Amino acid sequence: MIFLAAIIVCFIVAILFNRGISGIEEKPFRGFPLILVAVILQMIIFTERFFYSNYRYLTPYIYILSLLILLAAMLLNLRYRGLRIALIGFLSNLTVIVANRGYMPQDINKLQAMGKFDKVDMLNKFGKYYNGTIMSQETHLNFLGDIIAPTFLRPYASVHSIGDIILVIGLCYFIFEFIHKEERQVPEDKSIKV
C-alpha cells in the first residue's frame, strides 16, 4: 500500500512539475493490454474466495504467468531509463519467486514487527498465503525475499524485498520521464539578410 501511495505521489508531483501531462502525447508505450491482463489475473488469484476454492493450487502457476506477462511489457519499453531500473528490481523478485516455486519468502518476525498479525496467522496455519511463504532454511535466496521492515511507517507499510524498493524507484523515475515534455528547438534562420 505504501509503495502504491509513493507512485501516486510521484505521479502528482510529476504533473505539477511539468505543468500537465502533455508530454505523454510524444511518448510511445507498447504492451499496455499485457499489463491489464496481468493485473486482472492477480486480482483473481489474490482474493479470499480463490484462496479457499478448489483451485488454490493454481495460484503459483498463474502468479508466475502474470509476472512473465508483465516482464514482456517491460521488455517492450526498455527505451525508458526508468523501466530499465525497474527491471532490475522486477527480475530480483521474479528470480526468488521462481526459485521458491511461485512464492515469495516472507520473514515472520518482520511481519509481526510491522503489525501484520492476520497474515502471520494465515502463514502459520497454511504455510503459504496468497503469494507468500514462510521464510526458513528450506526456502531459497532469502536475502532477496521480504526482509525489509520499515517500522517507522507502521501500520501503513508491510515487509518488502530489495527488489520492491528498486522497482518503485524505477517506476517513479519512469513517471517523470514519461510525463516530461520535450523542449523543441526552434531551427535557426540561416537566410542571408541584405
Image (tube, rainbow, N blue to C red):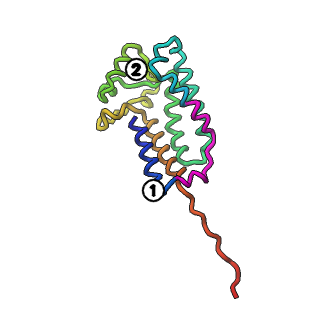
Instruction: Classify mark 1: residues with Cα within 10 Å, few (<14), some (14-19) or many (20+).
Output: few
Q: Are marks 1 and 2 in contact (CB under 8 Å)?
A: no
Q: Which quadrant of the view contains residue 32? A: top right
Q: Which residue is mark 1?
A: 17
Residue 141 vertical position relative to residue 180 in the rendered view, above or below? above
- From the image, state whether disc 1 or disc 2 is nearer to you: 1
Bounds of the magenta segment: 21-38
Q: How many angstroms separate mark 1 from mark 2 (CA)?
A: 42 Å
At horizontal 51% and vertical 41% (from top left) the residue drawn is 86
Q: Quadrant of residue 127?
A: top left
Dominant secondary structure of the residues highlighted in magenta in the image:
helix
Q: Is residue 194 left or right of residue 43?
A: right
The residue drawn where x is 60% and y is 52% is: 25
Q: Which residue is mark 2?
A: 134
Q: Nearer the viewer, residue 56 or 99?
A: 56
The circle drawn on residue 67 is: none
